[in-house]
Image: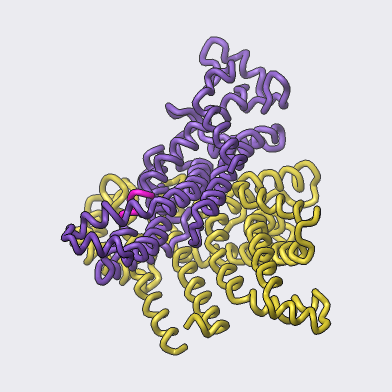
Chain colours: A purple, B yellow
Amino acid sequence: MKTSISILIIIFGFAIFAPLLTPYPVSGDTSPKMGEQLSNRHLAPSIKHPFGTDELGRDIFARTLYGARISLGVGLAARILAVIIGGLIGSIAGFYGGKTDFILSRLIEIFLAFPSLILAIGIGTALGSGLLTVIIAIVAVSWVDVAVLIRAVSAEISKRDFVMAARAIGEPESMILFKHVIPHCYAPLIVTFSFGIASAVMIEASLSFLGLGSSGNSVLGPSWGWMIYTAEAYLGVAPWAVFGPGLFLAMTVFGWNMLGDSLRDKFDVKAELR
Amino acid sequence: MINFFFRRIAGLIFVIIGVTFIVHLFIHLVPGDPVDTIVGQSVSEEDRIELRKELGLDKPLIIQYFFFMKRLSKFDLGKSMITQKPISDIIIERFPRTIYLALTAFSISLLLGIGAGALTALFPRTAFDKTIMVIAVLGVSAPVFVTALIFRYLLAEKFSFLPPAGYGPIAFVILPAMTLGTRSAAFLARLTRTTLLEILSEDYMRTALAKGLTPARALFKHAFPNAMPPLISILILDLANYLNGSVITETIFAWPGLGRFALTAISQRDVPSIQAIVLVMAVTYVLAMTLADLARAWLDPRLR
């Protein structure tokens, strides 16, 4: 738990305090000093440029720090939405059972049938590239694992005595769902939230790598996936350009997965989480 | 078993209907006129009207879906916007290459993953075990495109052991297959290890060892048969990772399969082609999942 939290705190720190941690602007110098900056292209890592410089002479360390903003921003936003949607659908199916459960379960099965990145690519291509597209695509492919988990958990909770007691004193069904069943799903929700951010971060990077994410310079900064995509073209001359964003990406995914693991052990959530 | 079989097949048919319905909706996700999305804007007004009629675009969604399915039953997936070739031809040409790549990757991951998992389970908590497990954790966390570029740089550009990219004799498949197999090998190694360790602590294993079997013999005669059913279904489920990974791996190694076709389709916003790719991959995946369920039920009667 300690390792994963420290990794994540460091990455969040980078994202928030990026301007204080590096003297270089994220998109490099504009017009007047551009020429000077270009003469710094493809510099190998050094004390001045810990991760080297890219094809436009920009400091890769600076860009990697800013890159944490998109990764974490998109990851968190997409996962929150996916947990809300998947949690609602799953708990409604698990709590009401019967026909409602039958219909929602079929819907869940259909979405489970898609390999996640493939469906995200399909949706992303149809909607056109951009940050919002990435978030929509991630939510569309990731609500379903929350739904599967929460359906099972809430079906079990619905059989407990306190639900029957609530029913006995005449509370309406929807009230029982929101007041008693959903709040009791908190442990699996927290666990799946953590695991899901890891995969959301991975899908975001993959989509950006394929050119479906935000372009290189959005308001938030570059995306790691996009940085690796541009570095690919210069792999022979400047292999280090992959290292910085690649390392941070792997660390972020690792951190959320580890946190998920320890939370699962802590809350003793027994469920197959993807 | 027969009952289970038919239930599973009925479920499969239903899911395929759902999958095709969702894929058919893609065309409506694109802002603007679906005709533009399908054939581009340089089409005469008469052609547009005709196409609209042919696709049933003036009718309600459900009817459009029937039109879509009717074309699909004739394996007519439309024409690619870029090459104007029928998409079904492109898929028939490219899909076998993706399968070839995936199967090679699968063999690599099977050999490495199960091998490493079994070895670490035999020597738990040794330095060997710990090193392998750290590598496995790294392998699971590293994104495909980062491992791909590291492999390509080290094995093809820095030291020219292998061709960096392209399609050709066996040497060309090694790099992309290694990349694609790494993640699942790492995953498999961890899984095999925990599964085997669990089984090794069972009573029947103690009995096997007590009656004088060597640990290796006990492993092969008693542990593997019990570990198999869950492993098989997980192996097939892992197929989704190969399909997901193929888009990126094939792009980086210029492997002319379905995944690379996806990239060209993305960059041209060729939605009909993307539809076809998503459809083929999703159907492959559901078929494999159904197969996994059936195989598992066949091996383990408790699940029927």
Confirm whether residue A80 shows in the render.
yes
Image position of B94 (left or right of B33): right
Residue at 58% from the left image edge and 24% from the top image edge: A62
Q: Position of residue A153 (x, y in %)?
A: 39, 61
Residue extending furthest toward the bottom: B2
Q: Which residues are magenta?
A: A83-88
Our reading of the magenta stretch's main secondary structure is helix
Residue at 74% from the left image edge and 81% from the top image edge: B207
Instruction: Tell which of A53 and A102 is nearer to you.
Output: A102
Is the residue B94 above or below the residue A231 in the image? below
Is the residue B222 above or below the residue A16 in the image? below
Residue at 37% from the left image edge and 70% from the top image edge: B15
B169 is within the stretch colored magenta: no
Confirm whether residue B86 shows in the render.
no
Q: Position of residue A128 (x, y in %)?
A: 38, 43
Image position of B98 (left or right of B208): left
Instruction: Tell which of A157 and A189 is nearer to you.
Output: A157
Q: Position of residue B277 (x, y in %)?
A: 46, 60
Image position of A39 (left or right of B244): right
Q: Position of residue A269 (x, y in %)?
A: 48, 57
